[in-house]
Image (cartoon, rainbow, N blue to C red):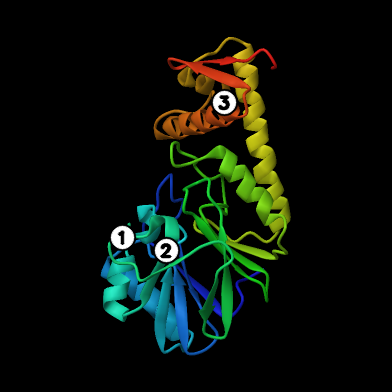
Amino acid sequence: MAEPPYIRHFTANNPGYMTLQGTNQYVVGREGAVLVIDVALSADSNLDGIIEQVEAMGAKKIDKILLTHIHSDHCGGALALRKRTGAKIGIHRSRAGYLGGEDFQYGEGDRIQFGGGELQVLHTPGHESGHCCFYESGDQVLFSGDHILGFGTSVIRPPDGDMTDYLRSLEKLLGFNISLILPGHGPLVGKPEAKIREYIEHRLMRQKQVLDALRKGHETIGAITQTIYVDVSGPLKNIAEFSVQAHLIKLIKEGRVKNEAGRYRLLDAN
């Protein structure tokens, strides 16, 4: 399965353990003006790559720049692209003023026009509290940002990252007919429902592992992480600790775990 002909992407040259092969930046439009989803880098080579995709589509100009969220690998080049093309920058309304120069805001259910079509805004907090996916209902395409990746799983880093919100946002997507997911990192996802359910099941499995570790007497984030992520080290260990912390915060909200000076214990009901 491939992208529809009115969608092209240019992958930024910012590979890494957090960004995989780099950030996917999408150009969307059927005629006239197009919009761009996410701009990772302000380097001329990156902006040139995006503009080349626009020109290859036969579009006249970039009308809008939409940001899935405010992490720098998705918005770092937005102001530079606006300066170069005159495009208007949009951002979730909870992040108004973050860039110091965005032109409009959007929220859940808003419709954003592009040349020959429209995108529906789906507010999907969890990875980041203002994170949005964009849904094109005609071909049932979802631009998922960092909510769903083409490979691996999204990082949930408290306090802005929230596991409760993340799972709720994943479940919300099951209410949409999605035929193709175009992620912020990694290859496209051709079996969206299976991928979403896999993500939910994976997080619930990790939650069970956290609870099992607590039952065995592991009381700190470090000890729980060491028990669950046996073969993980270096920077990836920090990411694993964020995930454990996010699960613990969720369990505290649910009244299943308590935190006493950095030591986590199960409540009697568990």
Is residue 81 at least partly visible in the picture? yes
Which of the two marks, 1 or 3, is nearer to us in this view? 3
- From the top left corner, tell me how far across and down residue 58 is, in percent: 47, 89
Asked if disc 1 and disc 3 are in contact, CB closer than 8 Å, the reply is: no
In space, the residues marked 2 and 3 are separated at their CA atoms by 31 Å
For badge 1, the amino acid type reads: Leu
240 lies above or below 18? above
Check disc 2 and give the amino acid type.
Ile
Given residues 214 and 8, the one toward you in this image is 214
Specify the quadrant of the image occupied by residue 188: bottom right
Cα separation, mark 2 vs mark 1, equals 9 Å
- Nearest the eye: 155 or 257: 257
- Quarter of the N terminus within the rendering: bottom right
Give the labeled residue for mark 3. 252
Q: Residues within 10 Å of mark 2 (few under 14, many from 20)?
A: many
Is 79 left or right of 139, judged from the image as shown?
A: left
Where residue 161 sits: x, y (%)? 48, 41
The numbered mark, 1 or 3, whose residue comes first in the sequence reads: 1
Residue contact between numbered discs 2 and 1, judged by CB atoms under 8 Å: yes
Q: Earlier in the sequence, mark 2 or mark 1?
A: 2
**Number of marks in picture:** 3
The residue under the point 62% across, 43% down is: 167
Residue sitting at x 68%, y 69%: 140
Which of the labelled discs sits on residue 91, or is there none?
Answer: 2
* Residue of label 1: 99
